[in-house]
Image (spheres, rainbow, N blue to C red):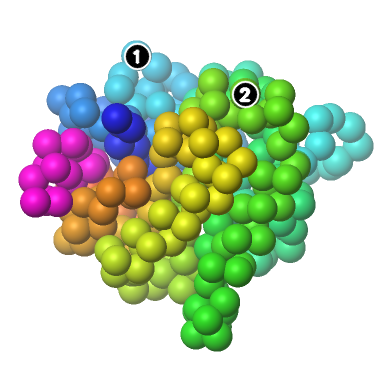
Amino acid sequence: MRTPLVIGNWKMHGNLARNRMLFTSLTLGLRDLQQVDIAICVPFPYLGQAQLLLSGTNIAWGAQNVSQFEEGAFTGSISAEMVADFECRFAIIGHSERRALSHESDQSAANRFVQTLHAGVTPVFCVGETGAERDAGLAKSVVGKQMRTLLDSLVSENLALAGRLGAVFSYEPVWAIGTGKHASPAEAQEMHAFIRNLIAARAPEFATASRILYGGSVNAGNAASIFAMPDIDGGLVGRSSLDADSFRQVCEAAQQPMRASAAL
Ligand code: PEP
């Protein structure tokens, strides 16, 4: 049985004072949720603040990217080892905003995934198609290529590490991110099953254990129906993670009893 997981992605929002208030509301508001794993991925400068304020709570923290290189002359970049120094549990890898705005390729996302594993941090590997690609009937070929580039880059040592660290995948249709539109539960389920089958073709036991999140305008109103799908193990949540009440409702929707009853 896979424990549901909800990860908030704060993107480039926040400052020390606002974060402190949000961390306080989140730690108080989420402390009784026991059947869902919860994490928040904050901007790099606030990893220390997250470590300070979330240590000892039921909320883990993480980064939103890492360099594809181990170390060296890469001004402005942050390595996986550096985020590991802040006891990050997770690092988001290959988010569509990185792929589009910073031209990160499928191969560089795969390299980042490997760096993250080697630093002992759990990667949250994002894949997804644009609206134009979906309209052209290319959704599975785009997601398939992103996944295969990753899977082909993983030697057996990396696969073992990914299994041990509980590597996470996230289907995030680009047309649904920050738009208020979301994939229907059936559309999302179809893609999640496709992703799980791709993983299974490479490593069957890893596929069964891997958590595959859905991301793209998840909110308090739509979370329960999306999370009720059998291959959807929780969410990667942008906008709704910036409001403690909304985020709590999304986390509640991911808890197993509600998930089971929603599926009936
Ligand atoms: C995201 O940032 O990964 C995301 C899914 O954002 P939103 O929930 O705002 O669509």
Residue 74, numbered circle? none
- Crowding at mark 2 (Cα within 10 Å: few <14, some 14-19, many 20+): some
Residue drawn 49% across and 50% down?
197
Report x, y in % for residue 244. Answer: 24, 44
Report x, y in % for residue 160. Answer: 62, 24
- In the rendered view, tell whether residue 210 sits above or below residue 222: above
Where does the magenta region start and end? 251-264
Q: Which residue is mark 2?
A: 160
| Residue placed most toward the observer, 194 or 237 | 194
Decide if residue 45 is on the left or right side of residue 211: right
**2 or 1: tag closer to the N-terminus:** 1
Q: Are marks 2 and 1 in contact (CB under 8 Å)?
A: no
- In the rendered view, tell whether residue 154 sits above or below residue 139: above
Q: How many marks?
A: 2
Residue drawn 76% across and 52% down?
107
Image quadrant occupied by the N terminus: top left
Q: Where is residue 105, by image quadrant?
A: bottom right
Residue drawn 43% across and 32% down?
209
Q: Which residue is mark 1?
A: 56
